Amino acid sequence: MTASAYKDFYTVEIGDTNFTIPIRYENLLPIGMGAQGVVCSALDTVTKTNVAIKKLSKPFQNIVQAKRAYRELKLMKVVNHKNIINLLAVFTPNESFDDFQDIYLVMELMDANLTAVIGIGLDHDRLSYLIYQILCGIRHLHSAGIIHRDLKPSNICVNADCSLKILDFGLARTAAEATFMMTPYVVTRYYRAPEIILGLPYNENVDIWSVGCIMGELIRGSVLFKGSDYLDQWMKIIEQIGTPERSFFADLSPNVRQYVESLARHEGYTIERLFPDALFYFDTESVDESDLNEYQQNTDAARDLLARMLSIDPKHRISVDEALHHSYINMWYKEEEVNAPVPHICNNVDIEQEEHNIMEWKKIIYDEIIGSPRELI
C-alpha cells in the first residue's frame, strides 16, 4: 500500500485500484472487492468514527453502468431507515467535469456481512430478529415503490449485537421501472424469484422470495437453489418445492411455456423434510419440557414462514406486511420500525425510461454529486 498527496486529497493503492480520498480519511483497509466496486474501511478523523468507502467500478464504461451508478446514488440519498445502510457522503476527487471519472460513497461501517453468520448455528431469537430487520428494511423500500431485486447474504450487513442493514441499490428499481424492465438477467441467480427467471411480470414480492432463500440458507448452512444457469436454477427450485399448477405458466411466452411444460413434473418435498428439526439450533444444556415445547413451536412457525415465502406462484406468496405479523416474527414488531416515514422518490428515479448518452449521464451524476449537501469536497 502506497500513498501520495494530491491537494486536499491523497491517493492510496488498494490492490489494483487507486483510492483518491479526502485527507480526513485515514487507515484504509480493503474489506470488499467485486464487480460493482472496491470497498475499504477507514477512520474519519473529523467525526472520530470508522466508515466504509466504496469506489464505484468504471461507472462510465457504458450506459448500463452509468444508470446503475446514478440509481445507487439517487436511491441511497432518499432512503432513511435503521435497517438500510446510511449514506454519509458522496464525493469525487476530480476537479472539473472534464476530468470527472471517479465516484466515492461514504457509508456506515458494519462488522460483517450475513455470509459470516451462515453455518454458525442461530437460535430462534437471533434468526427471527435478523429476518424481522430485513423485512423492516424492504418494507421501507416497498413503501416508496422501490424493489431491491438483489437481496443476498453479501448485500446484508450485521454487527455483533445482531443489528442489521441492507445495502447495494445498484439493481434496485422503482415499481414503474419494474413493469418496463423484465429481464431475467438481474438479481444474483441463487436468490432469483421464479417469475424473474421465467421472464414473467413481477412486483415487490420478488424480494420476499429472496428473503426466504436467505432464511433457508441461514438454517441449512448452504445455498438452497444453486443453479448453474437460469434454466438449471428453475430445475433446482421445482425439484425441491415442486412444479406449480399450470395456471402459473399462463403468461409465459409461447416458447418458454412449451419448454417448461415439457419438463418432468416434480412433486417436491414437504417443508418438514426440506428443513427437519435437526437443522434448527437448540442449546441442550439445562433445558426442561417447557423449553422443548417452545423450541418446537418456534421451529414449526419458522417452517411455516419459510413455506409461505418460498411459494413459486407470487399470488400465493406471503407479503411483507403479512410476514411482519407472522407468529415467528411479530414478537419483535415495533410500529416506528415497521412504519417509518416513507422516503420521497422523485419521478425522475424511473431511470430505465430515461434515454441519455454517456456524456449526458456523466453530467447528470456530476451535478448530483456537486449539488449534494453531503459531498465533502
Image: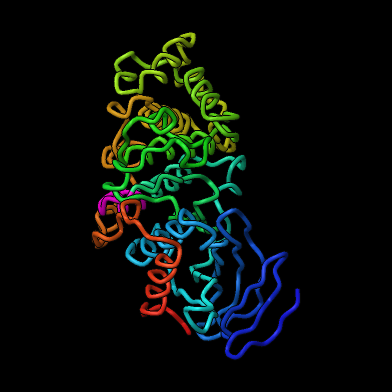
- Of 81 and 225, nearer the camera is 225
Up the image or down, 85 lies above or below 293; here it is below
| Relative side of 117 to 66, left or right | right
Please, which residue is most extreme toward the bottom here? Answer: 7
Q: What residue do we see at 61% from left, 49% from top?
A: 116
Specify whether 58 is left or right of 299. right
Magenta-colored stretch includes residue 145: yes
Q: Nearer the viewer, residue 183 or 175?
A: 183
Residue 194's x, y, as percent?
Answer: 41, 29
Q: Main secondary structure of the magenta part?
A: helix
Q: Residue at x 25, y 62 (%)?
A: 346
- Residue at 40% x, 78% y: name it: 374
Magenta residue span: 136-146
Nearest the viewer among 192 and 111 is 192
6 lies left or right of 90: right
Q: In x, y percent, where is residue 199?
A: 39, 31
Q: Is residue 167 visible?
A: no
Location of residue 175 in the rendering, given as x and y in whole percent from the top left corner: 28, 47
Would you say residue 251 sits in the magenta stretch? Answer: no
Q: Is residue 257 visible?
A: yes
**As displayed, is residue 303 above or below residue 187?**
above
Q: Quadrant of the N terminus?
A: bottom right
**Looking at the image, residue 130 lies above or below residue 291:** below
Q: Position of residue 204 (x, y in %)?
A: 31, 41
Q: Quadrant of residue 2?
A: bottom right
Residue drawn 43% across and 40% down?
A: 211
Q: Nearer the viewer, residue 186 or 95?
A: 95
